[in-house]
Image (tube, grey):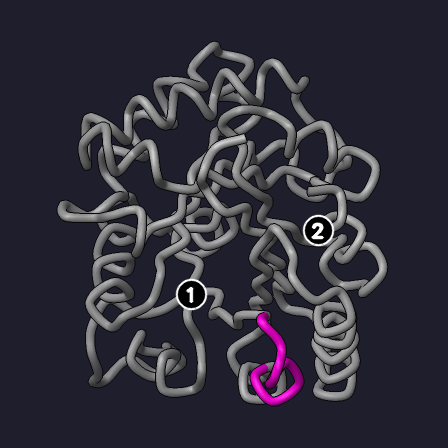
């Protein structure tokens, strides 16, 4: 096992009302407190409007709270957007940038993702930078090309293991129940670490956490998390139930 501390991150996406958020985050906080010392870090990323609720609910536990997106600019005329400084001010320690749903639904390019990640880092947040290929790209044999290009284009210069997490999400596996084989996951993660070394240096790349984010759940988590270059998970559906999310964490 590497010295990299496993990160179990939950992306709630556009789910939960305040009562749900309180119950979910509070339930996880109770389990974390009861567990005492654990060998993983836990992160929940609720919709922006629910961040204060989640922050309150996890108070006194070791659970971190993050945003699902931030704007590249510090402030200004950007209706509907949230600045990295505002997330930090609300109690966040992390923010997801470049999720495939943002890249697809909002047309976010690598350049935009890089600018958002840089804004996050500048404001003291850890940027969870998402990359991954579509099914068409995979079928065309372009998996490594796509992920290499996204690492090169989405990771800001000067990134470090302390302010950056990479999340590999094969787009075709998100929420579908389909997952690559363990060997395929390890191959891509090892490739990503190699590409990261070109970008930020071998020492930092060796310390940077690379999460797997394609339908990780209590059934497959143990196998995936045992892989040499998988340092945690960015979890969607399974993060919306206390028992399921905690079971993924316990499999560490």
Residue 170 screen position, x and y as percent: 55, 32
Residue at the left extreme? 157
Badge 1 crowding class, 10 Å Cα cut-off, few under 14, some 14 to 19, many 20 or more, is many
Element class at badge 2? helix
Q: Is residue 111 left or right of residue 35?
A: left
For the residues labelled 1 and 2, the Cα–Cα distance comes to: 18 Å
Residue to which mark 2 is pinned: 249
Residue occupying image coordinates x 62% and y 77%: 61
Q: Residue 118: say if magenta.
A: no
Q: Of residues 232 and 153, which is closer to you in this image?
A: 232
Which numbered disc flags the more N-terminal residue, 1 or 2? 1
Front: mark 1 or 2: 2
Quadrant into which the N terminus falls:
top right
| Disc assigned to residue 81 | none
Residue span colored magenta: 55-62
Q: Of residues 131 and 40, which is closer to you in this image?
A: 40
Total numbered labels placed on residues in the image: 2
Element class at badge 1? strand
Residue 152 screen position, x and y as percent: 23, 33
Residue occupying image coordinates x 72% and y 58%: 239
Query: Which image quadrant is residue 38 in?
Result: bottom right
Residue at the front extreme? 37
Residue to which mark 1 is pinned: 94
Quadrant into which the C terminus falls:
top right
Query: Which image quadrant is residue 150 in?
Result: top left
């Amino acid at each position: 096992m590497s010295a990299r501390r496993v990160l179990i991150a939950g992306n709630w996406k556009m789910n939960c009302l305040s009562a749900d958020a309180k119950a979910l985050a509070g339930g996880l906080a109770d389990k974390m407190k009861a567990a005492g010392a654990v060998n993983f870090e836990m992160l929940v990323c609720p919709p922006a409007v629910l961040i204060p609720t989640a922050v309150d609910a996890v108070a006194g536990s070791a659970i971190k709270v993050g945003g699902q997106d931030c704007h590249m600019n510090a402030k200004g005329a950007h209706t509907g957007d949230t600045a990295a400084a505002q997330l930090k001010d609300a109690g966040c320690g992390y923010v997801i940038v470049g999720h495939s749903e943002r890249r697809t639904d909002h047309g976010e390019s690598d350049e935009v993702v890089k600018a958002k990640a840089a804004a996050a880092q500048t404001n003291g947040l850890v940027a969870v930078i998402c990359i991954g290929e579509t099914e068409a790209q995979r079928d065309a044999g372009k998996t490594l090309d796509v992920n290499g290009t996204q690492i090169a284009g989405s990771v800001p210069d000067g990134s470090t293991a302390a302010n950056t997490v990479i999340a590999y999400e094969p787009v075709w596996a998100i929420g579908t129940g389909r997952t690559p084989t363990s060997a395929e996951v390890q191959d891509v993660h090892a490739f990503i670490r190699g590409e990261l070394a070109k970008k930020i240096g071998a020492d930092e790349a060796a310390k940077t956490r690379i999460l797997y984010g394609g339908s990780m759940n209590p059934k497959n988590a143990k196998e995936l998390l045992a892989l040499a270059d998988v340092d945690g998970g960015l979890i969607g559906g399974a993060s919306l139930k206390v028992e399921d999310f905690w079971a993924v964490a316990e499999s560490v």
